[in-house]
Amino acid sequence: MTLSIRNQLPGTVTAVTTGEAMASVKVRLSGGQEITAAITADAVKDLGLAAGSAVNALVKSTEVALATGPVQGISIRNQLAGSVTEVSTGGAMGSVKVTVEGGQLTAAITKDAVEDLGLAAGTSVVALIKSTEIALSAA
């Protein structure tokens, strides 16, 4: 299956906590960083997810926020450290490619944000992703 979602990071499920309707799935990415995905309990069952399952974490580029350092006092749990490899901007929006351990992410953010954060190749950043914005596919 071909998808328009650019951000596809391989990993392995380390834990699944299932509630009545939703589940929290912890995934260790191939680079060693951990993320959490909040998906439906039905999806866990349909994908046959359990500790040790190989998965791909999928995130739309519009759901990736960037910070110039770790952020405290925020509900966003997924904070992946990385380095900017490429920045391209248009009239209103920018596309920022970030290398993280085990893969690459693209963030679609405003041109103003690119400028305000001083983003350029080599800038250290933290990619912020809400757990509800991470989809999982069986690898």
Image (spheres, helix red, strand yellow):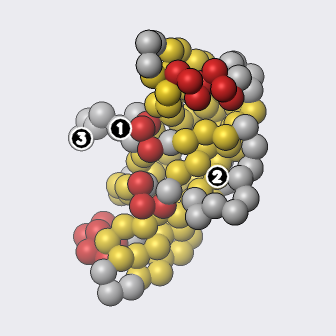
Q: Could you tell me the amino acid type at mark 2?
A: Gln
Can you identify the residue that label 1 sits on?
A: 5
Q: Which numbered dot is residue 79?
A: 2
The reply to whether dot 3 and dot 2 touch (C-beta < 8 Å) is: no
Asked if residue 131 shows in the view, the reply is yes
Q: Residue at x 30, y 34 (%)?
A: 4
The answer to whether 70 is drawn above or below residue 94 in the figure is below
Q: Is residue 81 left or right of residue 61?
A: right
Camera-near label (3 vs 1) is 1
Please rate how many residues cluster around mark 2, counting C-alpha atoms within 10 Å: few if below 14, some from 14 to 19, many from 20: many
Q: Position of residue 135 (x, y in %)?
A: 38, 55
Q: Which residue has dot 3 on it?
A: 1
The residue depicted at 60 percent of the width and 24 percent of the height is: 114
Tell me the quadrant of the picture where the N terminus can be found: top left
In front here: 102 or 52?
Answer: 102
SS at mark 2?
strand
